[in-house]
Image (spheres, grey):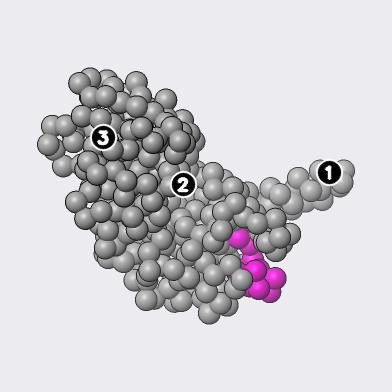
């Protein structure tokens, strides 16, 4: 059996995969040119940052382990007889910590205090607590569930939104995507952890944003397609929501000419909330390979109809 790893850090996976499948031929590449000799013979593909169109050139392919949580690009190119799995659980802790790093910093006025320090200005800023505030989590998969759990630890009321009742037990109140307007209007902090699907495309638009509280914080660590960016620019200029922290965007890298860069109440990170624990991803990939070889059910199987 031939296994191909296509990723910038491909060689870091090889040892773990060879240990899981000692009889297999495991190759690592980081570009299309390097991958060319292996396309025809590959049965199992571990990939991240790969041009999805090359899947059509892999006639023996039976399983793709995508080395990330979001599979919206690759699922469009998926042949009907190929299984696609995504990483589940490995990003939950670090992404939830990213969310609360910003929630705490923004609520407690950390950035404002730093600005005063640069001015040598002794001025007290009264920080606000998260306790008793209402946290809205849109998307209740493994990452959203961890955000909700941390919210509970901070004494927050939890509202959740998802396509199905899955994760409903994590919440004080549960909403469906069709109720996004009511959901967003009722929370102090709105965290988006939504996958990229037709249902979530542009789900946060002008109408939803205008309904949010004027002291609300919006954080998006899911997919940039969930927010209509031109509407968000207008909304932030109007101060509703009060602040936004964006880790994902409609176009990445975020173009230099985007007005989001210059908005004082917009805090930007470069799609880096999750991939800080590569060891966990390698462990997940190797364990799933062992399941594949032994005929056990794989973890993180994607439903192509749903897109996640």
Q: Position of residue 111 (x, y in %)?
A: 71, 49
> In the image, what residue occupies the spot 54% across and 44% down?
272
- In screen coordinates, is 125 left or right of 235? right
Judged from the image, the secondary structure of the residue bearing numbered disc 1 is helix
Query: Label 1: which residue?
Result: 118
Which residue reaches farthest bottom?
207
Q: Is residue 33 left or right of residue 128?
A: left
Real-space Cα separation, disc 3 to disc 1, in angstroms:
59 Å
- Based on the picture, tell me whether residue 154 belongs to the magenta stretch: no
User: CA–CA distance between discs 1 and 2?
Assistant: 30 Å
Q: Which residues are magenta?
A: 232-244
CA gap between label 3 and label 2 equals 39 Å
Please give the residue where the numbered disc 2 appears in the rendered image.
96
Q: Quadrant of the C terminus?
A: bottom left
Question: Quick one: label 3 or label 2, which is nearer the N terminus?
Answer: 3
Depth check, front residue: 89 or 127? 89
Mark 3 — residue? 41
Is residue 220 visible in this depiction of the protein?
Answer: yes
Between 150 and 50, the one lying in front of the other is 50
Q: Is residue 151 above or below residue 279?
A: below
Q: Are marks 1 and 2 in contact (CB under 8 Å)?
A: no
Task: Say whether disc 1 or disc 2 marks the residue closer to the N-terminus.
Answer: 2
Question: Quick one: SS at disc 3?
Answer: loop
What is the x, y in percent for residue 85? 28, 46
């Amino acid at each position: 059996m031939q296994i191909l790893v296509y990723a910038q850090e491909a060689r870091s996976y090889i040892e773990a995969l060879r240990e899981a499948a000692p009889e297999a031929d495991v190759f690592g590449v980081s570009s299309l040119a390097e991958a060319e000799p292996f396309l025809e013979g590959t049965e199992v593909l571990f990939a991240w940052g790969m041009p999805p169109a090359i899947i059509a050139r892999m006639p023996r392919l039976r399983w793709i382990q995508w080395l990330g949580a979001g599979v919206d690009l690759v699922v469009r190119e998926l042949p009907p007889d190929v299984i696609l799995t995504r990483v589940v659980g490995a990003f939950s802790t670090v992404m939830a910590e990213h969310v609360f790093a910003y929630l705490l910093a923004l609520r407690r006025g950390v950035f404002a205090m730093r600005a005063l320090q640069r001015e040598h200005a002794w001025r007290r800023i009264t920080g606000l607590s998260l306790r008793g505030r209402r946290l809205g989590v849109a998307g209740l998969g493994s990452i959203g569930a961890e955000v909700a759990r941390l919210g509970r630890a901070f004494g927050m009321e939890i509202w959740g939104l998802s396509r199905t009742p899955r994760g409903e037990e994590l919440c004080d109140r549960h909403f469906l995507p069709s109720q996004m307007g009511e959901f967003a209007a009722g929370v102090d902090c709105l965290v988006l952890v939504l996958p990229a699907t037709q249902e979530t495309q542009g789900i946060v638009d002008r109408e939803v944003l205008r309904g949010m509280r004027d002291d609300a914080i919006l954080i998006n660590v899911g997919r940039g397609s969930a927010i209509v960016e031109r509407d968000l620019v207008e909304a932030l200029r109007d101060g509703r929501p009060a602040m936004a922290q964006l880790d994902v965007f409609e176009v990445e890298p975020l173009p230099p000419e985007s007005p989001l860069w210059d908005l004082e109440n917009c805090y930007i990170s470069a799609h880096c909330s999750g991939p800080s624990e590569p060891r966990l991803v390698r462990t997940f990939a190797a364990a799933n390979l062992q399941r594949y070889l032994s005929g056990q059910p794989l973890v993180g199987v994607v439903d192509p109809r749903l897109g996640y």
